[in-house]
């Protein structure tokens, strides 16, 4: 039976970053991806300044940069501006291919695409009919994580994100729409890309079951007069049920760990950071990550904000409007961008 020191399941941002951090480390690493191509993922491709700083990505990968976004609350619109750029869009396929390319220089890393891990035991994983032994196993396999299920977590469906990918070069503005009538405590977005725009929304399935969200989204699209006749529909679960990172020689990262924000739906940053930090934990047993507690703290704060908004029910739009008003004050704006971004 073939053996690797580390088997990473899933080549999204978390798995790719974990593999990169293990590059040239002396550990043999296998990165396994079920899809034939690395990168494509149901995602709006929106990033904040901290993602850009962390990723250090080349400029050509950034599709649009913004120092202002339009926020609409139940018909009231505000242009939120900042001194420097704070919102960006990237294409997920390009991000994945760029991360993958970085791995080519590392002789200790093997990447297998079109390979699904369909069984896990304490000693090995099974890919197709091949058994591969591991010392460390990293679950970087997203919201439907098989590694998380193997660890005994039920992984119930939580959030759901849905979007239309509209082929267009005309949509240029970065926009958020809050209206509790359609999205309860969540929101809809328009994120422009070079060749298309992502127009979508998300919600917790407990509060707005997928069918209801889908129906509300279509009513909202109609009201906004958004033409979806040439668009591609996509939907994907969003797992924000955080259960932990380290389980002996098995680790969870990114969406598999449930690190995605329950409030904003942002998850790329958490995936990258947790992927890197887990690699460091493997390389230096006992390594106390300074960044994981920060991620967990923010994750909890977003959950608290969301829970408060859900309980506010008929006052949700009033709270959104109050929040929008506070954006007139620089100090609050700074705090809010820091908390949400
Ligand atoms: C509609 C929508 C919009 C979003 N928009 C944004 C946004 O604008 N900004 C943002 O920051 N986040 C956004 N997110 C969240 C973001 O997409 C995720 O948080 C991020 O992709 C998590 O990265 P990851 O590496 O943990 O998992 P993923 O990107 O999901 O990668 C997991 C990988 O594992 C592979 N895999 C799964 N199971 C197996 C298996 N058994 N064997 C082998 N491979 C496997 C998958 O094919 C996949 O490539 C959005 C999510 C949704 C649903």
Image (tube, helix red, strand yellow):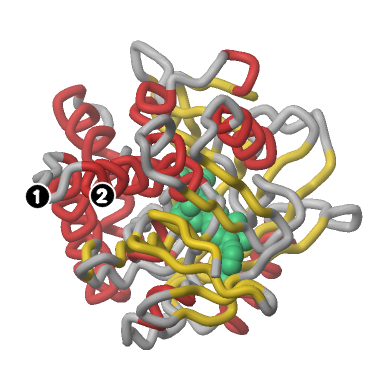
Residue that lies at the very extreme toward the right in this rendered image:
230
Q: Secondary structure at mark 2?
A: helix
What is the x, y in percent for residue 335? Answer: 17, 33
Q: Are marks 2 and 1 in contact (CB under 8 Å)?
A: no
Q: Residues within 10 Å of mark 2 (few under 14, many from 20)?
A: many
In the image, is residue 219 above or below residue 102?
below
Mark linked to residue 60 = none
- Which of 191 and 7 lies nearest the eye of the viewer? 7
| Residue 44 visible in rendering | yes
| Residue 262 visible in rendering | no
Q: Secondary structure at mark 1?
A: loop
- Which of 324 and 12 lies nearest the eye of the viewer? 12
Quadrant of image for the N terminus: bottom right
Quadrant of image for the C terminus: top left
| Residue at the spot of label 1 | 286
Residue at mark 2 to residue at mark 1: CA–CA distance: 9 Å
Q: Residue at x 46, y 56 (%)?
A: 4
Please state if 262 lies on the left or on the right of 197 as rendered. left
Residue that lies at the very extreme toward the front in this rendered image:
1
Q: Residue at x 81, y 58 (%)?
A: 232
Quarter assignment of residue 186: bottom left
Q: Residue at x 44, y 48 (%)?
A: 14
Please state if 299 lies on the left or on the right of 317 as rendered. left
Q: Is the C-beta of the residue carrying label 2 under 8 Å from the nearest atom of ligand 1?
A: no
Q: Is the C-beta of the residue carrying label 1 under 8 Å from the nearest atom of ligand 1?
A: no
Please state if 238 lies on the left or on the right of 282 as rendered. right
Number of residue marks: 2
Q: Residue at x 48, y 61 (%)?
A: 3
In the image, is residue 204 above or below residue 86?
below
What is the x, y in percent for residue 153? Answer: 33, 84
Mark linked to residue 282 = 2
């Amino acid at each position: 039976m073939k053996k690797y020191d580390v088997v990473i399941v899933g080549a999204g941002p978390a798995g790719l970053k974990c593999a990169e951090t293990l590059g040239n480390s002396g550990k043999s690493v296998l990165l396994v991806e079920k899809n034939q191509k690395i990168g494509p993922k149901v995602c709006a491709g929106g990033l904040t300044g901290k993602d850009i700083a962390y990723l250090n990505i080349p400029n050509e990968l950034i599709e649009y940069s913004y120092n202002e976004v339009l926020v609409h609350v139940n018909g009231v619109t505000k242009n939120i501006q900042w001194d420097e750029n704070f919102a960006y869009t990237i294409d997920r396929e390009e991000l994945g291919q760029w991360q993958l390319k970085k791995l080519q220089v590392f002789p200790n890393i093997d990447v297998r695409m079109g390979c699904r891990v369909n069984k896990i035991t304490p000693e090995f994983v099974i890919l197709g009919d091949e058994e591969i032994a591991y010392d460390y196993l990293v679950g970087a396999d997203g919201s439907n994580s098989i590694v998380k299920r193997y660890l005994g977590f039920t992984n119930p469906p939580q959030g759901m994100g849905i979007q239309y990918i509209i082929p267009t070069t005309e949509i240029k503005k970065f926009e958020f729409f809050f209206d509790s009538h359609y999205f309860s405590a969540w929101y809809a977005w328009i994120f422009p890309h070079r060749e298309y725009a992502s127009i979508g929304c998300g919600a917790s399935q407990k509060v707005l079951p997928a069918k209801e969200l889908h129906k509300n989204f279509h009513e909202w699209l109609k009201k906004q007069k958004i033409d979806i006749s040439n668009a591609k529909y996509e939907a994907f679960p969003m797992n924000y049920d955080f259960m932990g990172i380290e389980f002996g020689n098995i680790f969870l990262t990114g969406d598999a760990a449930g690190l995605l924000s329950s409030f904003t739906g942002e998850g790329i940053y958490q995936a990258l950071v947790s992927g890197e930090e887990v690699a460091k934990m493997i390389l230096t047993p006992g390594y106390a990550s300074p960044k994981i507690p920060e991620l967990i703290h923010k994750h909890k704060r977003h959950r608290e904000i969301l829970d408060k908004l859900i309980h506010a029910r008929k006052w949700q739009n009033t709270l959104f409007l109050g929040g929008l008003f506070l954006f007139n004050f620089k100090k609050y704006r700074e705090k809010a961008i820091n908390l949400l971004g």
